[in-house]
Amino acid sequence: MDALPGRSAAPVDEWSEGSAITDSIAVLGHRGSPYRAAGIAENTLAAFDRSRQLGADGVELDVRMTADGELAVHHDPEVPGLGPVAGLNAAMLPVPVPLLAAALDACGGLRVNIEIKNLPGQPGFDPDDRMARQVVDLVVARGRVGDVVVSSFWPDTLTAVRTAHPDLATGLLVASWLDPDTGVATAVERGCTALHPPVDRVDAALVDRAHRAGLSVAAWTVNDPGDLEAVARAGVDAVITDDVALALRTLRPG
């Protein structure tokens, strides 16, 4: 995903359905656009393709490292019935679990938010940030620097990305328990270009502080029409949503 440029938060009374403000808000499918009734699981090539078909601007996906050093697209630390991703070789992954290279190829023309899953206490924690450097190498090799943002809850991972490639956009994910002002300060300190707060911590004041600091703002996970309208009024640059169709109807009616 492009490092969406920071801009001043729009005053509440400027927001209206179908306005240029809402048209400019990027809509990203959370883990693609899974659809259980049709057998489409999250973080799969089919889910990413469904996001495209629904009209999303991009997708958000999660990456973990396998035991043999491959980059698996999977949210949870463990694969049900098999164990931690960090304890499995790539060949042991279930067929629906793609590697990042295949996911990037499937997301051609879409913005991609790659969340690196790397937290202390979880299986496979990577204190040396080898995974971050491999993600950067792959993004560069695929020619995707201009339409990818790498996000993480772990600031050291984002520092490693910036060190490996200063021009690659990075976004600090803000945990629900973290003071958003602290998130803004940390994002700036770590050289990030974006802040990714949870929807319930987004307001116009936070967005304005982030924009003044040169950060774009992507809110997650925004699934309710009222919340979509609220974050639009607040001036966010992107929403990450489980319901791409709803987000597009709400933000871009007609």
Image (spheres, rainbow, N blue to C red):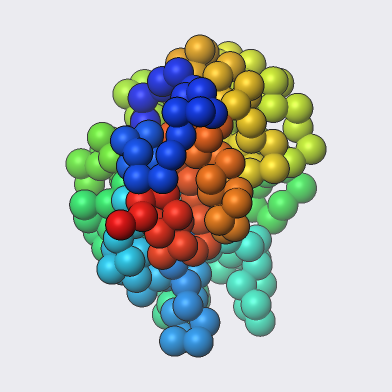
- The residue sitting at 65% across, 67% down in the picture is 78
Q: Residue 123 appears at what percent x and percent y?
A: 69, 55
Q: Residue 244 appears at what percent x and percent y?
A: 43, 61
Which part of the image, by quadrant, shows the C terminus?
bottom left
Which corner quadrant of the image does residue 77 belong to?
bottom right
* 43 relative to 16, above or below: below
* 226 relative to 200, above or below: below
- The residue sitting at 32% across, 24% down in the picture is 167
Which corner quadrant of the image does residue 19 belong to?
top left
* 13 relative to 142, above or below: above
Which corner quadrant of the image does residue 206 belong to?
top right
Q: Residue 232 appears at what percent x and percent y?
A: 50, 39
Q: Nearer the viewer, residue 95 or 208?
A: 208
Q: Residue 22 appears at what percent x and percent y?
A: 39, 40
- The residue sitting at 74% across, 41% down in the picture is 176
Q: Nearer the viewer, residue 43 or 73?
A: 43
Res 114 visible: no
